[in-house]
Amino acid sequence: MTITEEQSALIESVRTYCDANTATVTQRDALTEGGTESTSTKTTHDMGERGWLGISLPEEYGGLGGTFFDETLFLEESSRGLAPINAYSTGLTAAQTYLKWGNDEQRTTVCTNLANGRLEAISLSEPGTGSDLGAVTCKAELSGDEYIINGQKTWCTAAHLAENLLVLVREETTEKKHEGLTLLMVPTSTPGVEIRGIELMEPRTVNEIFFTDARVPASAVVGEAGQGWKQLMRGLSVERLIIAAMSLGAAQRSLDDTVAYVSERKAFNKPLATFQALRHRLADLHTEISFARSFVYDIAQAVDRGEEDSLGPQSSMAKLKCTEIAKQAALEGVQMMGGNGYTREYGMEGQLRTAIAPPIYGGANEVQRDIIAKNLLGRP
């Protein structure tokens, strides 16, 4: 595959920005309230001003009109640069659903927000329904020209920073659980919407949301009422590809930092990089990351060609492989750095904490394996 001069310039620009602004723990702490947030509004604002956010979104709706491959390159490089923009990926996933199913007003609002560094969120999971999204119970009742929403959502990334929530609700109960579901666009400022952070082993990322007689107009429906499940499926496939691209960048960063460390650090009067036990493990990681990169790039370019039929299983493969590699690369980094790998100063422990969640987010990797197996074996 060929990366154009414009794409190479994008990669270099993002890398230069991250090297200057987000490379160190001290810099990231200053941007994220002492390391307590996973997203910096200053960084998203900076990147929006530089024209990097919403790069793949259509110009007519406020985006920049680039390709999804452009977006993939940005996601990979910004993740490699440790840029604290975790919430952007969630907004990008939401935007794909709005672009496919939303009306012009919804598309323009969401795409313009993202391109300017204002964030969006998706609210799907509930306390009893994570992987089994068809079992959601959060209720939306149509009353006149309004929907009244009651229920609870959880694990909602960036809800506390978002302008709007894309909420999966149950409008009616049917024999088939995947029917009767609707997607609603709910402003986070809506009375009756309460957002509470969930404490994690990494900086604040996800939230619980409580809806108590929250009212939105009937025009808040995204797509068609009762068709939420069908509409959601493409959005989840794109989300998995987005997670894959970011995990690819995270894996590369962990490998880069580990290579730099073992090249400098000495034991028994010679660099750690001279020990075969470490060299071979690094060679394996480099090989895995390189192959994963080619696969992710291929899928992104297939999206740009309109080949969406194969996106489901392929995005599951990419998400599975890249998130596992990112976790393994960070684990190896901590191990090869020894005691230093366990300190905040060297940053690798933070990369490990961040790498643990993606194998769960966007559909646990066990679910991805099942999707891949169903496609392979042709069985329900």
Image (cartoon, grey):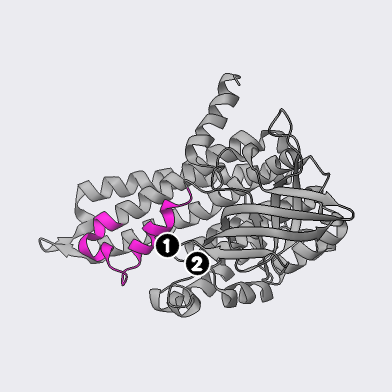
Q: Earlier in the sequence, mark 1 or mark 2?
A: 2
Q: Amino acid at mark 1?
A: Glu
Main secondary-structure element of the magenta-colored stretch: helix
Q: Is residue 339 magenta?
A: yes
Mark 1 Cα within 10 Å, few/some/many (few <14, many 20+)? some
Q: How far across and how far down the image is residue 231, in percent?
A: 75, 42
Q: How far across and how far down the image is residue 25, in percent?
A: 39, 74
Please identify the quadrant where the C terminus is shown: top right
User: Does residue 227 show up?
Assistant: yes
Q: Is residue 11 above or below residue 23?
A: above
Q: Amino acid at mark 2?
A: Ser
Quick check: marks 1 and 2 in contact, CB under 8 Å?
A: yes
User: Does residue 55 show up?
Assistant: no
Residue found at x 25% / y 56%? 336
Mark 2 highlights which residue? 38
Residue farthest along the left direction in this orientation:
268
Query: Could you tell whether 89 is left or right of 79 in the image?
Result: right
Magenta part of the protein: which range?
334-358
Query: Could you tell whether 352 is left or right of 361 in the image?
Result: left
Could you tell me which secondary element the residue under label 2 belongs to? Answer: loop
Mark 1 highlights which residue? 202
Front one among 282 and 1: 282
Inter-mark Cα distance, 1 to 2: 8 Å
Query: Could you tell whether 336 is left or right of 237 in the image?
Result: left
Mark 2 Cα within 10 Å, few/some/many (few <14, many 20+)? many
Could you tell me which secondary element the residue under label 1 belongs to? Answer: loop
Residue found at x 39% / y 50%? 327
Residue found at x 60% / y 53%? 153
Q: Is residue 288 magenta?
A: no
Q: How far across and how far down the image is residue 84, in percent?
A: 51, 68
Residue found at x 62% / y 65%? 194
